[in-house]
Image: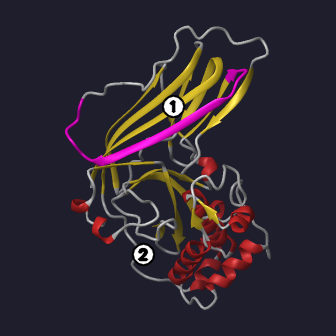
Amino acid sequence: MKLDIHYRMHFRYSDPVTEAQNEVRVRPRDDDCQRVVSYRLASQPAAAVLQAVDYWGTVVEHLGVRTPHTEMELRAEASVETSPRPAPDGDADRSAVREPSFRDAYFEMLAASPHVRWSEGDAVARKARAAVDGADTFAMMVAAVIEDVRATLRYEPGSTEIGVSLAEILEGRAGVCQDYAHLAIGMMRSIGIPARYVSGYLFAADETALPEEAASPDDAPEAVSVQTHAWLEAAVPGWGWWALDPTNGGTVGERHVVIGCGRDYGDVPPVRGAFMGSGTADVDAEVVIGKRRSRDAFVYAPRRPADPAAGVVPQDAFWGQQQQQQQ
């Protein structure tokens, strides 16, 4: 599928800031099932962009604004070509997850991480064991966890915040895509299935369901307004990473665009940064994704220009944090 992606993030500050530093992870990844045709990131106020690749293989862009401002906007445009992602061509016995060589190869994705914590015998571990009881094969175990998470949680934007624990997700029984992914990852790791968090975009008007009529690229809408999306990949013994979307239970394929992966959300936030100022930051973000059209010249057009007469930050200024939450 050929897709255009337009990402916009807009910061507004209650008081002028003199400096803002950000690291951005919104560039789609190049891999065997996805090719980036073009990409560009720009900011207002304008800033130089330094690009690097982090430990997990995700492209990270660093940019800083060091002039007084009351607003800042980031815009990224990408064109990608995606193809179907493969599913395992065989099925291993569930005992394969206990093989020392398998556990050693994926040890980082078996351990607890900042957003995916559990302990032996807690609610997450008990829930995982109950879900896979009676599953004879690896694929049946994975499918059972995904089904259990979907039966447990209801999709409710605004019901959770960054940093919510798995126990709190279970107690509230509601969340967004990152919560579905975190809970499924925690359950899988607790029973020996290596799993990693994937950040990206989903070309669908409703991320909780992929209707049959939209499964074909020809039937997809021209464009939809969405937020960044999250799903997971489970390591299959003797095969590799298997992509699954617990938010909708659908196949991860041409409509999913990968940005990057890591242990949990903390390794692949779309934007993380800090600003120098005495006030607070308000942020909103939007992704418009649609079928490829002819490429126009990149034109930067912020919704509201930053105030040129921003003034000077008071002497008691401090570094504040700014970050986007996956929706």
Q: Tag 1's secondary structure?
A: strand
Q: Check disc 2 and give the amino acid type.
A: Pro
Location of residue 217 (image quadrant): bottom left
Q: Check disc 1 and give the amino acid type.
A: His
Q: Residue at x 54, y 51 (%)?
A: 327
Say if the magenta span includes residue 164.
no
Q: Tag 2's secondary structure?
A: loop
* Colouring rule applied to residues: secondary structure
Task: Check disc 2 and report the residue beneath it.
Answer: 88
Q: Label 1: few (<14), some or many (≥20) within 10 Å? A: some
Is 4 displayed left or right of 69 in the figure?
left
Location of residue 93 (image quadrant): bottom right
Q: Residue at x 67, y 77 (%)?
A: 128
Question: Which numbered dot is residue 288?
Answer: none
Q: Position of residue 258 (x, y in %)?
A: 43, 52
Q: Main secondary structure of the magenta part?
A: strand
Q: Which residues are magenta?
A: 276-296
Is 82 displayed left or right of 285 in the figure?
left
Q: Residue at x 34, y 53 (%)?
A: 34
Q: Earlier in the sequence, mark 1 or mark 2?
A: 1
Task: Check disc 1 and report the residue beneath it.
Answer: 10
Is 115 displayed left or right of 195 in the figure?
right
Please state the total of marks drawn on the protein image. Answer: 2
Q: Residue at x 68, y 84 (%)?
A: 130
Q: Position of residue 207 (x, y in %)?
A: 44, 60
Say if the magenta span includes residue 282.
yes
Relative to 114, is 131 above or below?
below
Report the mark closest to the observer, 1 or 2.
1
Q: Are marks 1 and 2 in contact (CB under 8 Å)?
A: no
What distance separates the C-alpha of mark 1 from that of mark 2? 41 Å
Q: Position of residue 10 (x, y in %)?
A: 51, 31
Of 25 and 103, nearer the camera is: 25
